[in-house]
Image (cartoon, grey):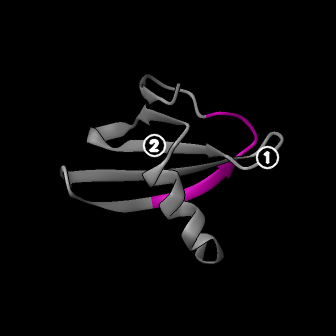
Amino acid sequence: MASHYHDVLEAIEGPEIVVRGNRGALKAARSMGKRKWLVVVYREVSRDDGFVITAYTLDARPKGKIAWRRH
């Protein structure tokens, strides 16, 4: 995912959907075209600070309880 550094940052800054993860983590997801989603798992430390845990791609939108959705 190192070659997708800017895509990862864009997914966190402007996700299409945010799904709740385990132990307070959040999953920001952004569509990367037909049937491909970039998912970034991250944790917020404060309103202005946080860190990325991991990032990966999926063939479908991530499942889970939706915390936020772009309208």
- What residue do we see at 33% from left, 44% from top? 25
| 11 vs 57, nearest the viewer | 11
Three-letter code, disc 1: Gly
Would you say 30 lies left or right of 58 here? left
> Rounded to the nearest whole Å, what is the CA distance between mark 1 and mark 2?
18 Å
| 40 vs 71, nearest the viewer | 71
Three-letter code, disc 2: Lys
User: Does 51 sit above or below residue 44?
Assistant: below
Residue tagged 1: 33
Query: Are the residues at dot 1 and dot 2 in contact (C-beta closer than 8 Å)?
Result: no
- In the rendered structure, does residue 60 fall within the stretch colored magenta? yes
- Identify the image quadrant of the N terminus: bottom right
Magenta region, main secondary structure:
strand
For residue 60, which quarter of the picture? Answer: top right
Would you say 47 lies left or right of 42 here? left
Most extreme residue toward the right is 34
Residue tagged 2: 27
- What residue do we see at 37% from left, 53% from top? 42
Would you say 30 lies left or right of 35 here? left
What number is the disc on residue 58?
A: none
